[in-house]
Image (tube, rainbow, N blue to C red):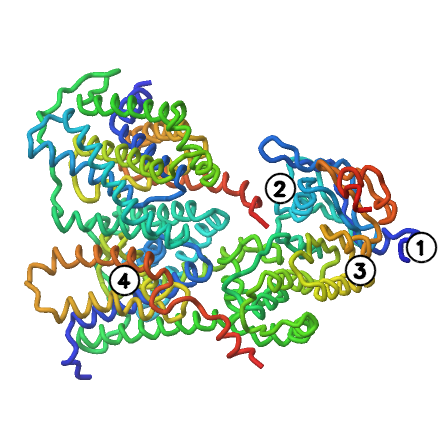
Amino acid sequence: MVADVVVAPAVTRPRIRIQGAVKSFSGRVVVDVDDLVLGDQPIEGLIGPNGAGKTTLMRMIMHSTPLDRGTISLLPAGGRETVLSSLPAHRMAHHGVVKSNQVIMDFDKLTIWDSLLLAAAEARYEQPHRVFSERTVFGRHEDEIRHYLDYFGFADPTAFALSAGEKKLLDIVRCLLLRPSFLLLDEPTAGLPDELTDKVMTVVKDLAAAGTSVVIVEHDLNVIWSLCDEVLFMAEGSVILRGAPHEIRANRTVVEKYLGEGHV
Amino acid sequence: MDLKWLDAFLISGLFDVAMVMGLALLLHLQLGLGRIANFGVVGFWGIGMYVYGVLYVQVDWPFGDPWQFLVCAAAATLAAGVAGLLIGWLISDLDTDGVLMGTLGFAAVVQILATTQDDLTGGARGMGGLSFPYDIGTVKQNEFLWLAITAAVVVVILLYVWWVHRSPYGRLLIAIGGSEPLARSLGKSTFLTKLGLFTVTSAAMGFLGAMNGVFVHFLDIGTIGVAVTLAAMVGLVLGGTARVWGAVIGVILTVGLFDIVVQSYLPLPREWYTQAIPVLREALFGLALILVLVFRPLGILGDMRRDRLMRKIHGR
Amino acid sequence: MEFVTQSLVIGLTENAPLVLAAIGFALLYRLTGLINVAYSETITLGAYFGMWINTTYGLDFYAILIPTGILAGALSVATYLALFRPARHHNVGALELIIISFGLSIFLRHGLQFVFGYPERFYDVPSPDTIMILGVGVTSFRLIALLSVAILSGLLYLFIQRTTLGLQIRALASDEDLARVSGIRPLAVTTLIWFIAGVAGGLAGAFYGVGASVSPLLGWRQFLLILMVALVGGSWGLGGVIVVGVATSVALAGMALQFDQVLYAQLVLIVAFVVILKVRGSKLTETAKV
């Protein structure tokens, strides 16, 4: 296992460091993380009871929720440190930091093809004076997009994504097309049938093996136990435990606070 | 060229239709795709018209037409583009309320400046001295040629809009109109995109304003009121905000019906034309706007059909 | 010093209706979320209602205030019930609602023009006494307007902030579902909000009308200022609207004294407000939902 041969994973894998990050909504502290580094392991799982601040923390990393205090920075593999928390939200993807959405989000006027071409298209083709560049963009990304379409079995990509599952999947494929170096997945498999969950997990494993750091929030603990190299347990806004899946699974606090006695 | 069949009313009616159609097509890019409600269309059009007029009349150019027209029209386009850049910068990260205030405010500013700077613009007295950048014979022939040129410009705008729908740029605009946060999370700078959209469309509105100045020969602050914005908006909304041809169909059915059919062909008492008809026109446009948006918000043509379009251009 | 007192007195007395109108507009905006462009015609119609009652029944100006307010309030409620409520039921989007109100505004304004024509009309009132305040001559009507506006604003503020009904209104605005569960009847309360906003707008119109003249464009001329005061001041609550409204009134009068053209004062205000909105708006951009 990768986790057993760790010597200095920091050199090859992008990491995100969260320092003194605090967020409160109308007086209630939702996230209060003192010092946390994500990305030491290829795939890290973030678990915890509802309201523990998992989703908020992820949104803070993406800067779609501004921080009250603190900094979040990206330590890329072999590059210079970038302070993410001072960048506008759209710059995250340029640094390879990409997140899938917990609640279903879609462009309701765009078809599946549209949505994927949008994710893949480079900004230089999306200019007011480049209205003839559709062929170029299509040519550059068709193979990659078709690969995902076939792999996940989208029925008709020229149509709109209709079911919740299809939209969820589309969201994940959009993330993949952004070529993430640091991928955050917020409940990626909720609402997906088992076979698609497996396919998503396979893609995630491949990505991680190729050098992408993955952090996954998931309620389906089977996914967490089988996929993650490390699990972080979050409660009341901060990470109170981290360790290998079997350690977390056996931990008393986790069992009492979250899993319940019957779940072990 | 024998133009007996064409009376002066018809030429000016057709010119109005072309002008509003051009504005409505540009508004379609802002409102239909980007979902930015520009209530200050007349401001960008008006700044183009006045910059053109002032430069054409007040500056002693060393060259004559058509160069004088081209240089002044280019300056007018540039001025409207810069205004679009500035207003775009102000409103691109605001919500609809802020956009309403910013664009309405801009239109008011243009009207105020046109009124107060009366040594340049003629203010409330108006300003004459404009003419066609050519002379091919009778007034009617000159007007007809200008109508043809304007129609050609509108066709170019229509083609551009048609291509935008088939481009990555158009897709991004639709995405921004749909969900800005989601577009941002895909690495798209929604701010810069809206800024670019506003700059380009405003510049084009300014150019149309300059063309209008050439046609009417006389600039009057009464013509840069909210009626212009209304005409473009009601035409677009009636035809269909989201569709390429919405502006075309809608403007024919609103401005075309009123400025050509009612003005020229209905046997109405003479005194109605100066007072009652223009007021009635605005009232009916307002009413049409309400009725369409309540009962058929997407207009006659309905929603955009990206599925059909995708099948056509990328289908298997 | 003379400049300051002049600006204060002229600003407050001449532009007092602005504050009242902005309060009504902001109430509607904050409590129902709607930017109602047709509010400008509520103001205009208030001025016409007042003039109609005044000239038809020969009532003096103070006696017409109550029926004018009720008529304008009823008109406001009518637009809600006949148009905005059905539109909401048709799931019309926020952007479309603004355009609808824009259409309604145009329709009413030109409808009025069609009926009444362009000429400005006047209230039939005895020519007002001029009273000297801090060395500035002020007509008694404007003074009454200022007093009435101050009293009405205060009452509205207290009503919204201190009474049970006001509490219900605020509850409905912040969370409709929760309010419904708590036994608040949304239709009744929303209708009440529209009525109050209409009364405020209509009275503002009557004050504008008696201070100068009545024409179909009366409300629309003030709309941009009202919108700006309500949007910028509204983020600090009703108190903010009052403060910003008063500041705007005084600034407008002060600049009108300084510049040779009144329009420059408007120009400066428009630019100032848009810049304020921009500065404030930039801080809110990244809080969107993803």
Q: Disc 4 versus disc 3: distance between alpha carbons?
A: 63 Å
Q: Is residue B249 above or below residue C169?
A: below
Marker disc for residue A66: 2
Specify the quadrant that holds the N terminus of chain A: bottom right
Question: Foreground residue, C106 or B135?
Answer: C106
Three-letter amino acid code at the position of disc 4: Gly
* Closer mark to the observer between disc 3 and disc 2: 3
Question: Mark 3 is on which residue type?
Answer: Ala
How far apart, in angstroms, are the residues tagged by discs 4 and 1?
Answer: 77 Å
- Residue at figure coordinates x 21%, y 40% from the top left: C44
Residue depth check, mark 2 versus mark 4: number of the one nearer the observer: 2
Please identify the quarter of the rendering in which residue B80 is found.
bottom left
Q: Position of residue B152 (x, y in %)?
A: 34, 75
Q: Point out the frontmost of discs 4 and 1.
A: 1
Q: Secondary structure at mark 3?
A: helix
Residue shown at 62%/55% (left/top)?
B185
Q: Is residue B204 left or right of residue A133?
A: left
Circles 4 and 3 on the same subunit: no
